[in-house]
Image: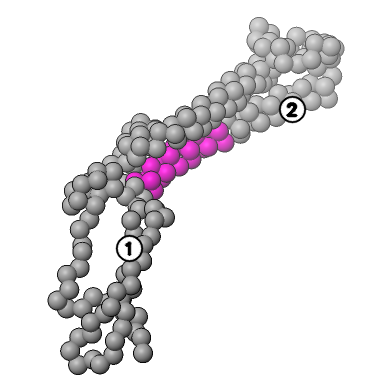
Amino acid sequence: MLLCMSSVYPGHAQDTSFVAVNTGASGDSVFHSPRKAALFAAVLPGMGQVYNRKYWKLPLVYAGFATLGYFIYFNGSHYITYRDAYLDFTDQNPGTVSYLKLINPVIDPSTYDPVLYPNTYKKEDSDWIKTQLKDGMEYYKRYRDMSMIGMAGWYILTILDAVVDAQLYDFDITPNLSMRIIPAVPPDGLTVAGLTCSITFK
């Protein structure tokens, strides 16, 4: 009768030495701090990835910020343009005509501008122009705000990525395994013979 035993019997020393990943020195472990990685990533985006030695992630981090930054600028500048045009169109100052740059030049201003052409404009045309300017202003404002939220989300995501990488920094994922089967000596009082199966991660 054979018995497969994996327990450690009294009197047999167990090898508990720890070899630190990245140092190669027995018993010389280096603690990789997730808190420090989060702090670095929060102070300067990308530094958490550098701390974790994930240098290949730096282009991704800054590409995300650059893309979202461009959308913030693009939508923000167009929002300001439409906002100013809307305000110029709805005031009573004939000197503020920035809206003319946004309206198709083939449309005659005398048909929709109540300030410059109070005697010839049509109310329905004026209301339509006002609606178009207001819709454009709200459209770019909405997407500017969404881009800002995306920027904040990307910032938080880079911090979380640094924290996760720091927590898994010393996690051994080597595929090398070895198995050894040796005779087992049972404790006093047992009359069965068995084998000890020892699996070692290298």
Residue 135 in magenta stretch: no
Horizontal side of 160 relative to 9 (left or right) equals right
- Image position, residue 30 (x, y; %): 22, 46
The quadrant where residue 106 appears? top right
Which residue is disc 1 drawn over?
Answer: 200
Q: Is residue 181 shown above or below 128?
A: below
Which residue is disc 2 drawn over?
Answer: 131
Q: Quadrant of the N terminus?
A: bottom left
Who's the residue at 14% across and 76% down the image? Answer: 11
Magenta extent: 146-166
Who's the residue at 25% across and 49% down the image? Answer: 20
Q: Quadrant of the C terminus?
A: bottom left
164 and 41: which one is in front? 164
- Image position, residue 95 (x, y; %): 66, 6
166 and 11: which one is in front? 11
Who's the residue at 66% across and 17% down the image? Answer: 85
- Residue 62's tag is none
Q: Can residue 155 be seen in the rendering of this structure? A: yes
- Image position, residue 111 (x, y; %): 84, 14
Name which residue type carries label 2: Thr
Q: CA distance from mark 1 to mark 2?
A: 73 Å
